[in-house]
Image: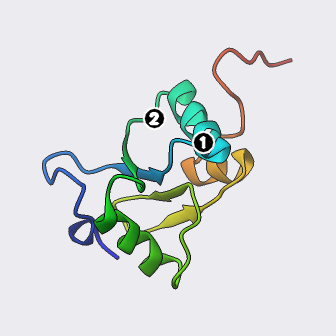
């Protein structure tokens, strides 16, 4: 999958897209982690966008689990834990405000 396959991306500003629903606590958790880390992303609510739902179903071979996070290089995570998301972002797991020894 490439950035061209994502109908919700502004071609002038490629980046992370988070597909989710407003009622899902895992979506809220992942978005809060991204917000806290200062990671820019576009959010697409699957309840409001049937085209996005079809994209998510293609990625997941028919399933629609959220959150689904898609990067411009085509990599994606489905229902990641905080540690999995931080690892994909390339961070060491430290959150802003954490202090080292």
- Density class for disc 1 (Cα within 10 Å; few <14, some 14-19, many ≥20) is many
* Residue for badge 1: 30
- Say above or below: 41 vs 55: above
Residue at the image point whose x is 53% and y is 69% from the top: 64
Left or right placement of residue 63 versus residue 58 in this view: right
- Say above or below: 39 vs 69: above
Q: Position of residue 47 (x, y in %)?
A: 42, 54
Residue at the image point whose x is 37% and y is 72% from the top: 55
Q: Position of residue 50 (x, y in %)?
A: 32, 65
Q: SS for tag 1?
A: helix
Q: Position of residue 34 (x, y in %)?
A: 53, 35
* Residue for badge 2: 39
Q: CA distance from mark 2 to mark 1?
A: 11 Å
Is mark 2 in CB contact (under 8 Å) with mark 1?
no
The quarter holding residue 100 reads top right
Of badges 2 and 1, nearer the viewer stands 1
Q: Give the color scheme: rainbow, by chain, secondary structure or one colour.
A: rainbow
Instruction: Give the quadrant of the C terminus.
Output: top right
Left or right placement of residue 42 versus residue 24 in this view: left
Instruction: Give the quadrant of the N terminus.
Output: bottom left
Residue projecting furthest to the bottom? 61
- Say above or below: 35 vs 53: above
Label located before the other in sequence (2 or 1)? 1
């Amino acid at each position: 999958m490439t950035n061209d396959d994502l109908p919700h991306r502004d071609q002038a500003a490629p980046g992370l897209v988070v597909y989710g629903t407003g009622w899902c606590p895992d979506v809220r958790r992942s978005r809060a982690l991204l917000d806290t880390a200062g990671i820019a992303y576009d959010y697409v609510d699957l309840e409001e966008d049937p085209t996005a739902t079809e994209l998510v179903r293609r990625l997941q071979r028919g399933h629609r689990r959220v959150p689904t996070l898609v990067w411009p290089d085509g990599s994606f995570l489905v229902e990641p834990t905080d540690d999995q998301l931080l690892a994909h972002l390339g961070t060491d797991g430290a959150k802003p405000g954490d202090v080292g020894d």
